[in-house]
Image (cartoon, rainbow, N blue to C red):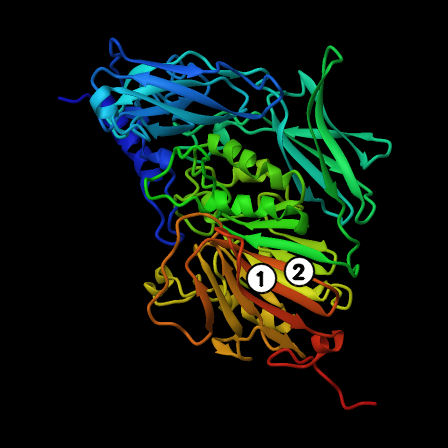
């Protein structure tokens, strides 16, 4: 008969597996590949003659933050289900697993790998010969690594061999800076990750106008612990120490000036550990008449350049989006990622993987983020939706890994001025309905902008609060999140919001200028004259697996594209705006429209937005 303690342990392990394996129906493509591994069911079955060799064993000899490692391996009893796991720290099988309580027996292994690949990947004869090789990419993540060969498949792993330790020269090095606009227009923040706490080193940024005298700015240091996670797997097999997250505030920037910067840490012995040197262009003055270009998308996630962690039919949409943005970086001034950032879903190592992936972009232009269901949602944590989508993270990693100019980072809603743009970024994972604090913020963001100086008013949110033809909405008999546009469309219309953009639905869709389900103006490639209604755009095809569209198409749905891509807004001046939807796979513009509007057109009276007048003279 099974002991009560083992029965409770089995029940807990089942909960761990269930909490991460159930893919949410709404967003689609929300399963974290690491959740397929039943690491808590691992047994040791060291196989004589089995081995894993890794080369090189020492990485980053020339200051690299990422390097390729070649593996060779042998299993005398091979199977098509054999797989290689990459573990960090390297002593994954030596650690003592914490127990949730006295009734729960801890598992043999308590840490998931940071990535995995099947042993027969590109080794067609592996099942016959038991021999294989592969190349995997490692990034500097503050700890050493080891590679383990498993049999038994992902669901019942049996550890049969492990490699020697692999490490970077300095695992603690400062890495992966990400820029963000501060709370004022002339402030840029730099956030990065390292293994140095404040007792060991002092973080700072050396920066200044390009080619001129550089100055030093201190950085604050934050981290978070396992106890701040709300549930499994973030609190159990998915936990990995996040290291230390540093943020420095570069103030009093001159508009449009080019600046260089370098992150560093001064050790207690006086020596300095430097990161790489980068550069950025300071934001324009609010209302400045100049060329301004902003890229917007949601749901990109991360992917591995070595093909690991993914399904056999995976299309690298995330890598394609990252590649196209990097390729076009000289024509981009800011990036806004509106939620479902990396789909870590409780596997904390994936946040490092994501910051490394976007580093070429985020180190050069502000990389602003919003909150999505895969960052925030968890039962009993205060999220508006009580699902398991965050994998127990309940917003903590997102709030720490990226800076946002919010008054309260837990709330994660904020406004942002960039030249002729005013962006109002909502948090759909907290209540937005009339009477709430967020509703008041949204209205204030709309009402406080000077449209003569900043004519282009843009609303951004993760879940679709406007219009979408996604099948998962249609199955519920709707075309939006419940109570979405019913709550907010009076504000969009009253304050003449030009464009509202969303993620969550993995694909692209553009509406006509629509209000209360009716096209107030015919959808077109060019709009001019007085404001009629808000154009709603779903741009959630950043990289996660694509969603389906309903068979019946509403009249307000003008363009649909079931492909990966992103939106790009270009403000030429105060009267001309270009919207483009760019496909990630080839950089082609699949949809676009322009807006020509004078200030008097913004003031003009329209449907449900006419101010009160008087006959008095």
Determine the image quadrant of residue 357: top right
Label 2 crowd bin: few (<14), some (14–19), many (20+), radius 10 Å: many
Q: Decide which of 555, 218 is in the foreground and name it.
A: 555
Look at the picture and state if 396 lies above or below 130.
Answer: below
Other-residue count near label 1 (Cα within 10 Å), few / some / many at <14 / 14–19 / ≥20: some
Name above or below for residue 165 compared with residue 343: above
Q: Name the spot of residue 340 as percent of width and height, x first.
A: 48, 46
Residue 580: assigned label: 1
Task: Please determine whether, in this image, residue 590 is positioned above or below residue 121.
Answer: below
Task: Locate the N terminus by quadrant.
Answer: top left
Q: Secondary structure at mark 1?
A: strand
Disc 2 marks which residue? 570
- State left or right for residue 34 relative to residue 400: left
**Distance of mark 1 from mark 2, alpha carbons?**
8 Å
Most foreground residue, 403 or 321: 321
Query: As drawn, which residue projects farthest toward the left?
Result: 1
The answer to whether residue 216 is seen in the rendering is: yes
Q: Residue at x 38, y 56 (%)?
A: 547
Identify the image quadrant of residue 7: top left
**Residue 266 left/right relative to 76:** right
Quadrant holding the C terminus: bottom right
Please tell me which residue is depicted at 40% across the width and 45% down the height of the picture.
315
Q: Which mark is residue 144?
A: none
Answer with mark 1 or mark 2, whichever residue precedes in sequence.
Answer: 2
Spot occupied by residue 207 in the image (x, y as percentages of width and height): 78, 33
- From this viewpoint, is residue 432 visible? no
């Amino acid at each position: 008969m099974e002991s009560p303690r083992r029965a409770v342990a089995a029940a807990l392990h089942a909960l761990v597996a269930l909490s991460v394996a159930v893919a949410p129906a709404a967003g689609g493509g929300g399963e974290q590949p690491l959740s397929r591994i039943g690491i808590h069911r691992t047994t040791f079955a060291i196989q004589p003659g089995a081995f894993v060799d890794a080369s090189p064993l020492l990485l980053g000899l020339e200051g690299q933050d990422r390097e390729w490692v070649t593996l060779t391996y042998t299993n005398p009893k091979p199977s098509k289900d054999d797989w290689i796991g990459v573990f960090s720290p390297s002593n994954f099988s030596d650690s003592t697993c914490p127990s949730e309580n006295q009734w729960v027996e801890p598992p043999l292994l308590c840490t998931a790998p940071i990535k995995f690949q099947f042993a027969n990947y590109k080794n067609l004869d592996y099942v016959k010969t038991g021999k294989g090789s592969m190349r995997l990419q490692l990034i500097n993540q503050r700890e050493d690594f080891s590679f383990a060969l498993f049999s038994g498949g992902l669901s019942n792993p049996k550890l049969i061999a492990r490699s020697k330790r692999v490490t970077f020269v300095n695992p603690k090095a400062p890495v992966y800076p990400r820029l963000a606009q501060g709370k004022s227009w002339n402030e840029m923040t730099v956030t990065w990750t390292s293994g140095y706490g404040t007792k060991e080193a002092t973080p700072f940024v050396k920066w200044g106008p390009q080619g001129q005298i550089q100055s030093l700015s201190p950085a604050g240091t934050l981290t978070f612990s396992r106890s701040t996670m709300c549930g499994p797997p973030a609190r159990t097999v998915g936990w990995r120490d996040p290291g230390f997250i540093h943020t420095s505030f570069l103030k009093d920037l001159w508009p449009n000036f080019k600046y260089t910067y370098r992150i560093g840490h001064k050790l207690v012995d006086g020596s300095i550990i430097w990161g790489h040197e980068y550069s950025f262009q300071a934001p324009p003055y609010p209302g400045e008449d100049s060329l301004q270009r902003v890229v917007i998308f949601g749901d990109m996630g991360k992917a591995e350049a070595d093909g690991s962690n993914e399904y056999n039919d995976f299309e690298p949409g995330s890598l394609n989006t990252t590649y196209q943005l990097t390729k076009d970086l000289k024509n981009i001034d800011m990036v806004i990622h509106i939620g479902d950032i990396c789909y870590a879903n409780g596997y904390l190592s994936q946040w490092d993987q994501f910051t490394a992936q976007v580093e070429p972009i985020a180190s050069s232009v502000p990389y602003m983020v919003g909150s999505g269901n895969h960052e925030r949602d968890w039962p009993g944590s205060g999220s508006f939706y009580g699902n398991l989508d965050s994998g127990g993270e309940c917003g903590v990693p997102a709030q720490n890994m990226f800076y946002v100019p919010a008054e309260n980072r837990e709330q994660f809603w904020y406004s942002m001025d960039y030249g002729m743009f005013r962006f109002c970024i909502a948090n759909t994972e907290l209540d937005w309905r009339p009477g709430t604090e967020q509703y008041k913020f949204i209205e204030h963001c709309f009402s406080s902008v000077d449209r003569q100086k900043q004519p282009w008013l843009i609303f951004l949110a993760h879940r679709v609060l406007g219009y979408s033809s996604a099948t998962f909405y249609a199955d519920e008999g709707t075309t939006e999140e419940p109570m979405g546009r019913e709550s907010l469309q009076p504000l969009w219309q009253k304050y003449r919001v030009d464009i509202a953009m969303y993620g969550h639905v993995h694909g692209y869709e553009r509406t006509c200028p629509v209000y209360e389900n009716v096209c107030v103006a015919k959808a077109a490639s060019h709009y001019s004259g007085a404001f009629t209604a808000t154009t709603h755009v779903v741009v959630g095809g950043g990289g996660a697996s694509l969603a389906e569209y309903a068979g019946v198409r509403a009249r307000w749905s003008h363009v649909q594209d079931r492909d990966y891509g992103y939106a790009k807004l270009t403000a030429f001046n105060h009267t001309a705006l270009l919207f483009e939807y760019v496909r990630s796979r080839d950089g082609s513009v699949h949809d676009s429209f322009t807006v020509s509007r004078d200030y008097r057109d913004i003031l003009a009276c329209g449907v449900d937005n006419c101010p009160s007048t008087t006959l008095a003279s």
